[in-house]
Image (cartoon, helix red, strand yellow):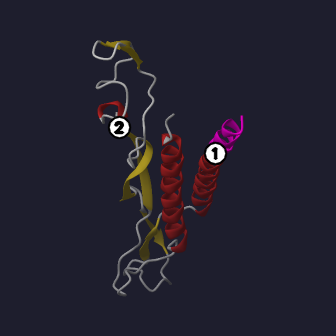
Amino acid sequence: MSFNIFDIAGSGMTAQRIKMDTIASNIANINTTRQPDGSKGVYVKKDVSFRTVYEDTLNKGYSNFSSNNPDAEFDPKTGNMLINANVSLNNGVITGGVRVDEIYEAENGVKTVYDPSHPDADEEGYVDVPNISLVEEMVGMISASRAYEANATVAENVKTMMQSAMNI
């Protein structure tokens, strides 16, 4: 039996946690128009992109075949018929799931507004501020939170099924 479902769920939980951290940073800096050192420079909204992780565990020597062939194969040395059922042992390597590909600055991460009373406004009264919508960020936070919970539920359900199977 393959136990990489825990890797998949765990990688999803990690990716969603990073997304929630990025959203929290965006919300915390919604009005930031200065850099940490005090110099002028607006905070730019950050976004997260994910990438699918899929490594062919069948090429790692822990399964029935040396290639990802969906057919059965006869081993003349042992007389056994080996069937590729995508069954593998986990050797501490994440064999599937998702990972954070990049945390990047959004293309439209800054907007210019007219606010002559702002201390960072230029001589015409315009100031660059982060283009962060609190509503959009909260929707993203709820979505990431639900995805995190779904991955945690998957891991818990698989654990329960494995325990039930051992009790049979």
Q: Which mark is residue 55?
A: 2
**Residue at image coords 45%, 30%:** 87
Neighbor class of circle 2 (other Cα within 10 Å; few <14, some 14-19, many 20+) is few
Amino acid, disc 2: Glu
Residue 31 vs 51, above or below: the answer is: below
**Residue at image coords 49%, 56%:** 14
Q: Which mark is residue 67?
A: none
Where residue 68 appears, as percent x and y from the top left, is: 34, 23
Is 165 inside the magenta-drawn segment? yes
Residue 58, by quadrant, is top left
Residue range corresponding to the magenta coloring? 157-168
The secondary element bearing badge 1 is classed as helix
Residue 80, by quadrant, is top left
Q: Which mark is residue 159?
A: 1
Amino acid, disc 1: Lys
**Magenta stretch prevailing secondary structure:** helix
Residue 133 vs 33, above or below: the answer is: above
163 left or right, relative to 12: right
| Gap between marks 1 and 2 measured at Cα | 23 Å
Mark 2 or mark 1, which is nearer the start of the sequence? Answer: 2
